[in-house]
Amino acid sequence: RMLQLEEESIREMCQDIIALKPDVIVTEKGISDVATHFLAAAGISALRRAKKSDNNRISRATGASIVNETSDLKEQDVGTGCGLFEIRKIGDEYYAFFDQCKNPKACTIILRGANKDVLNEIERNFHDAMNVTRNVMLEPRLTPGGGAVEMALSRALDAMSNSQSDVKDDFFQGVEKYPYKAVSRALEIIPRTLIQNCGANVIKQLTVLRAKHHQQADQFSWGIDGETGQIVDMHQFGIWEPIAVKMQTIKTAIETAILLLRIDDIVSGTKKASTLTEGSGQGDGKRKKDEEENKATDESNKD
């Protein structure tokens, strides 16, 4: 009787699904053999034990809705955005593909490599490329790479902080100039590091780059070629960086410097381990001495 009731319950749930005439169903849980039989008889493919993240991606790609109970199924819950579903074998594994989707909100990219290390490196590079594309889509403005922007900002801050004007509305006055000088020197670290990585003469190349930006203030695209260490025009060389990344980098550096400057003192709450060790050693020695004295007293009483 119990098996009959179970089969009737499974049949009802399958009938709720079959009534909507889907081609494929995906579930995060298991599917019994009885349910598989009913669905296969109706020409419905079933995928079981899918990850929640994969289920969400399939829903976004096909336009289907995730439903917890079969009794709550509606016709609009069926995704009609997928044009082709098939199982393909790649290597030794079988994969389910939802292809030819109309206006998909999610997609999957398969990466393959010779070994795990190569595959991890490919994944990191691809993730970086996707983030760069995302930043450019959100903020299409670009800046010259190769340390050109850092050197241009360094030159501008250095020029304004070195001004000798006594005008009240001047940019920086008195001690206010020193923080900007420090920021100006810090920004030169980027082109300096690029030159060092190429093995070029740091002092010579940095001096020439600084002179380029001073002589042509409106041409701020001079930077360092990351392969040769030579000074080139990034506009002609084709090296660009998203302005969103550059702005966030500078903001984070300034905010970190402000955070460190606001620290007045550091209080350490750790105890010295040597004190505890010495104390426990003295206690053990005293306890051993007392035991020896008690033993000697007992032997004298026996005598």
Image: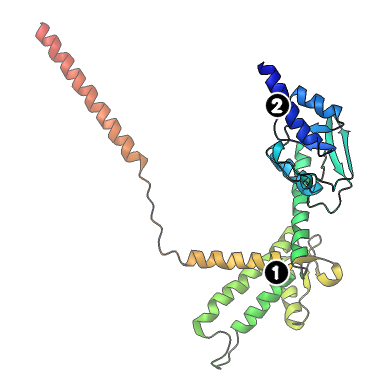
Q: Is residue 233 visible to the viewer in this orientation of the structure? A: no
Residue 80: image location, x then y, percent? 84, 47
Q: Secondary structure at mark 1?
A: helix
The one nearer the camera, 148 or 14, is: 14
Residue 87: image location, x then y, percent? 87, 34
Occupied quadrant, residue 33: top right
Q: Which residue is mark 1?
A: 203
Mark 2 surroundings: few (<14), some (14-19) or many (≥20) residues within 10 A: few
Q: Is residue 223 visible to the viewer in this orientation of the structure? A: yes
Tell me how far mark 1 sits from mark 2, CA to CA. 81 Å
Q: Secondary structure at mark 2?
A: helix
Q: Residue at x 72, y 68 (%)?
A: 243
Q: Amino acid at mark 2?
A: Ser
The one nearer the camera, 186 or 267, is: 267
* In the image: residue 179, left or right of residue 217: left
User: What sort of colour scheme is used for the picture?
Assistant: rainbow
Q: Amino acid at mark 1?
A: Ile
Q: Residue at x 11, y 10 (%)?
A: 300
Residue 45: image location, x then y, percent? 83, 32
| Number of numbered discs on residues | 2
* The N terminus - image quarter: top right
Q: Which mark is residue 9?
A: 2
* Whether residue 205 is situated above or below residue 213 in the rendered picture: above
| Chain-order first, disc 1 or disc 2 | 2
Q: Residue at x 85, y 42 (%)?
A: 98
* In the image: residue 2, left or right of residue 102: left
